[in-house]
Image (cartoon, helix red, strand yellow):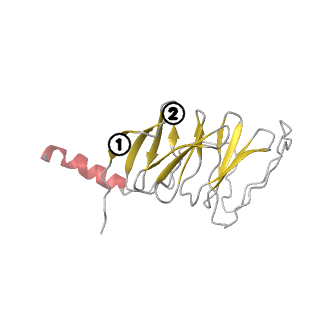
Amino acid sequence: MFKHRYLILALIISSCSSIANMQFWKSDEAEVDLTKPAELKEYKKEIDINLVWTNKFDNEDNTGFFKPAFSSGKIFFSDSSGKIVSLNNSGSYEWEANINNLSSGTAAGFGVVVVADVDGNIICLNQQNGDVIWTINVKNEVLAPTAISARYVVVKTSAGELIGLNKTTGELIWSYRSQILHYC
């Protein structure tokens, strides 16, 4: 220990030194004034972007929208009041469903659209027509969109539980509850 005390002392003293005058890179350009915004350079347009269609999705209670989901050439929108719509690639409505008080955004894939309501119900709808395939209550609110695979719908509850459901039937396949730390 005593053999290395001078080395440790040298490291401590050198760590207190200033590096303001050190030059880490060399440049032939003049110094840049960082207090002024950089001059905008001309933008070279490489492709033309054309508006194909627009559509307005009204939220009647103005409490917010969730992110849309994209699957099989369709777009699925939902809002917190429970309105779910499917638009095709030309922007036309395919179907509309109403499920009260949604708490999570729309997830879509593998032929289904999945949403959750504020009571902890997971609702799986047919992607083609919006009919409800199954509903299951997971006993806690779900705030994030579900994940969908060919076999499973995976849900994360507000209580920290990760739940795997059968995509076809809604049957509980597995569940994992993590420890949630509570701070005083």
Residue name at image x 24 percent, y 46 percent: 7
Q: Are marks 2 and 1 in contact (CB under 8 Å)?
A: no
Residue 131 percent coordinates (x, y): 62, 43
Residue 76 percent coordinates (x, y): 67, 45
Q: Which residue is mark 1?
A: 175
Residue 55 percent coordinates (x, y): 80, 51
Instruction: Tell me the SS state at disc 2.
Output: loop
At label 2, which amino acid type do we have?
Answer: Ser
In this picture, residue 44 sits left or right of residue 20: right
Instruction: Tell me the SS state at disc 1.
Output: strand
At label 1, which amino acid type do we have?
Answer: Ser
**Outermost residue toward the bottom in this view:** 184
Task: Find residue 114 and report its image quarter.
Answer: top right
Residue name at image x 42 percent, y 52 percent: 157
Sooner in the amino-acid sequence: mark 2 or mark 1: 2
Task: Find residue 171 and report its image quarter.
Answer: top left
Number of callouts in the render? 2
**Outermost residue toward the top in this view:** 150
Q: Quadrant of the C terminus?
A: bottom left
Numbered tag placed on residue 60 in the rendering = none
Residue 103 percent coordinates (x, y): 53, 57
In this picture, residue 66 sits left or right of residue 116: right
Q: Which residue is mark 2?
A: 149
Pick whichever, 174 or 20, lies toward us. Answer: 174
**Outermost residue toward the left in this view:** 2
Q: Residues within 10 Å of mark 2 (few under 14, many from 20)?
A: few
In this rendering, is residue 148 above or below 155?
Answer: above
Distance CA(mark 2)–CA(mark 1): 16 Å
Pick whichever, 75 or 138, lies toward us. Answer: 138
Q: Residues within 10 Å of mark 1 (few under 14, many from 20)?
A: some
